[in-house]
Amino acid sequence: RNNSFTTLQRMQKEIHKFLDNAIEQGVFHKAVVGLIYPNGETCVIAKNVSENAVFDIASLTKVCPTSTIALHYILTKKLDLKAPVSKYLKKINTNYRDEVLVWHLLTHSLDYSVPMSSLKEKSPEEILDFLFNYQFEKRPGTLFNYGNPASILLGLILQEVSGKHLDVLAEEMLFLPLGMNRSGFFPLKKMQKEEIVPTEICAFRNREIQGEVHDESAFVLQKLFPVGSAGMFSTVPDLLRFLKMLLQDGKFEGKQVIASGILEMISKNAFARDISACTALGFELNSEKFMGKCHSPKTFGKTGFTGASLIGDAEKKAGIILLSDFTYPKREKTPARINETRSALADLFFNGI
């Protein structure tokens, strides 16, 4: 492929045009895109907002920081992938109690079949009680069932193993070493409300959500602790640093931030042949739904309900990030339009490098 400067310039122009078009069609009003080229250079494209605008990254929290720290702990032998969750969380009292492993949390292969948003009227203690005493219909590891419960439990395990809340742990292990100085939980503690992009005019809370977590169950649970499934706020420049570190197998600017071996873990299918789904440990893998068609099979990533996505191609050593206000002022009934946008944007990028 011709990787010349003019080719990249042309692609950036196309991305500008693409984002203008998405805004015109009302997919979102504000968006920032970050690109990592195979040579390690980065580029940020912002529409109707500063490139340093802070967004609620929703389920990207599951990977930044939750599963990334968990995988570091596994690689450094502080956490056992094949250990029962009950080893770390003594209150777990589900059926199949001793068969529910850390591995099941990282592969979302537990049969929690109730959406967490349906529990938003409960107290945080009642939500935890629900998760700890849930009765599964199907055996752990027999299906792929993406959702919040696994990441909530994983966050609690990290808290148990480290003795620190997830916000403190993430700050020490990721944000400080990577220079992600506009990232974290509870953003209103360190920045002005105006710097944060609002996510929705919310009927449940009867106000505009700006600077507080959009996800309902995380909003309730945060009264007790920062949650592993949602609640992180970040910017595209900060997330480019995080993604670059992953693409360099845990290294950033010559320093090993996360244990090496992580890139292999997040870029290969964790499931055996008996489950037809494809997922890496802690990350989605090779998912055309939002990654498009022009990436390699070793492409990992994650989406967030608010209109966020992060995609890294382990073979091309390239990646793309989108943060947007897709759910503002009101969420759409399905993620169809944002997924089409994510997918087409990824194709535009990966096809052009």
Image (tube, rainbow, N blue to C red):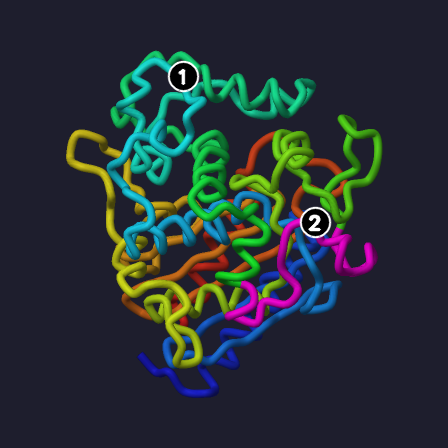
The residue drawn where x is 57% and y is 51% is: 308
Q: Is residue 121 left or right of residue 88?
A: right
Label 2 crowd (10 A; few <14 / some 14-19 / many >=20): some
Using the image, determine if residue 55 lies above or below residue 335: below
Residue 61 lies, in percent from the top left, at 53, 47
- The kind of residue tagged 1 is Asn
Residue 211 lies, in percent from the top left, at 75, 48
Q: Which mark is residue 93?
A: 1
Snapshot quadrant of residue 208 = top right
Tell me which label, 2 or 1, sits earlier in the chain: 1
Image quadrant in which the C terminus is located: bottom left
- In magenta, the rendered stretch is 175-197
CB under 8 Å between callouts 2 and 1? no
Give the total number of marks visible in the rendering: 2
Residue 66 seen anywhere in this rendered image of the structure: yes
Q: Name the residue under label 2.
A: 186
- Work out how far the residue at label 2 is from the one at label 1, CA to CA, in angstroms: 31 Å
The residue drawn where x is 50% and y is 33% is: 148
